[in-house]
Image (cartoon, grey):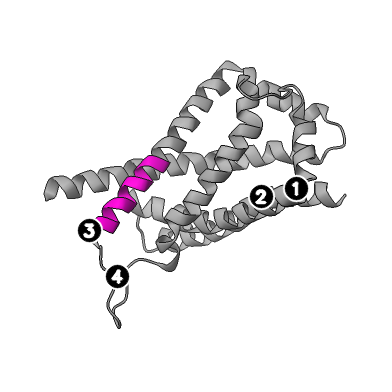
Amino acid sequence: MKHVLFASISKKFVMALAGLFLLTFLPVHLGINFMLLNSDPEPFNEAAHFMATFPPVKIVEIILIAAILIHIIYGLIIQIQNWIARPVGYRSGEKAETSFFSKFMIWTGGTIFIFLLIHFFNFYFVKLGLVQGDPENFYDMAHQLFRITGYNIFYLICFILLGFHLYHAFGSAFQTLGLNHRIWTPVIKVLSVIYAILIPAGFASIPIIIWLF
């Protein structure tokens, strides 16, 4: 029993570290994406070329993909273990100890995973030469996608769900790492709200502006 408990805690610990690494990557990605709002495609294309060819960035890219896979796989394993441990729903009058957002983490995470697959297909696999496209002109490729109404709607829905996912994940990661404090825990909760609003809103604003203007 202790071994199972320790294994579960270990998975949560590793998943939290991977999640925090992904949280540091999103603002960088957002900053590059804001270059799509520039009427000149060169800055964005040059940034994309730099990210695809600079050796240290390529190493970080491998770590990033590993972090994504670890976060997804461990998240699924932990969720399945929770389902097996509690196969019967709560009886009437009983309250779950988990928060509202934590109950839906697997579903918001699943939607984000589907979005990542589409995103990789549209851009990353093009860079690898697995999908047809011009890896030196991701600017035009992004603008063409953001002019498709259906793609924009799906994009916006995914980032709304990402906001809910980030809100719970931000605070939960610090709690899993044991960083609980009577002063800093409320600060982390406030930061999680700010992060969960600003980052998805930033990503969502880009296709809206391109689509409208």
Per the model, the C-alpha gap separating discs 2 and 4 is: 33 Å
Q: Secondary structure at mark 4?
A: loop
Q: How many angstroms separate mark 1 from mark 3 (CA)?
A: 42 Å
Numbered badge on residue 155? 2
User: Which residues are the magenta region?
Assistant: 72-85
Image position, residue 84 (x, y; %): 24, 56
Query: In the rendered structure, which disc, 2 or 4, sits on the residue that comes first in sequence?
Result: 4
Residue 85 is labelled as 3
Residue 159 included in the magenta stretch of the image: no
Residue lying furthest left in this view? 1
- Mark 1 vs mark 3, foreground winner is 3
Local packing at callout 3 (Cα closer than 10 Å; few below 14, some 14-19, many 20+) is: few
Amino acid type assigned to the residue bearing label 2 in the image: Tyr
Q: Amino acid at mark 3?
A: Ala
Q: Earlier in the sequence, mark 1 or mark 4?
A: 4
Q: Which residue is mark 1?
A: 207
Which quarter of the picture shows residue 195?
bottom right
- Residue lying at 61% horizontally and 33% vertically, measured from the top left: 121
Residue placed at 32% from the left, 71% from the top?
A: 96
Q: Which one is in front, 11 or 23?
A: 11
Query: Does 38 sit above or below residue 97?
Result: above
| 64 up-or-down from 12: above or below | above
Name the amino acid type tagged 4. Answer: Gly
SS for tag 2? Answer: helix
117 or 70: nearer the viewer: 117
Please state if 109 lies on the left or on the right of 131 as rendered: left
Q: Could you classify mark 4 by the number of other residues whose Cα lies within 10 Å: few (under 14), some (14-19), or many (20 or more)? A: few
Q: Earlier in the sequence, mark 2 or mark 1?
A: 2
Between disc 1 and disc 3, whose residue precedes?
3
Could you tell whether 103 is left or right of 159 in the image? left
Mark 2 → mark 1, Cα distance in angstroms: 8 Å
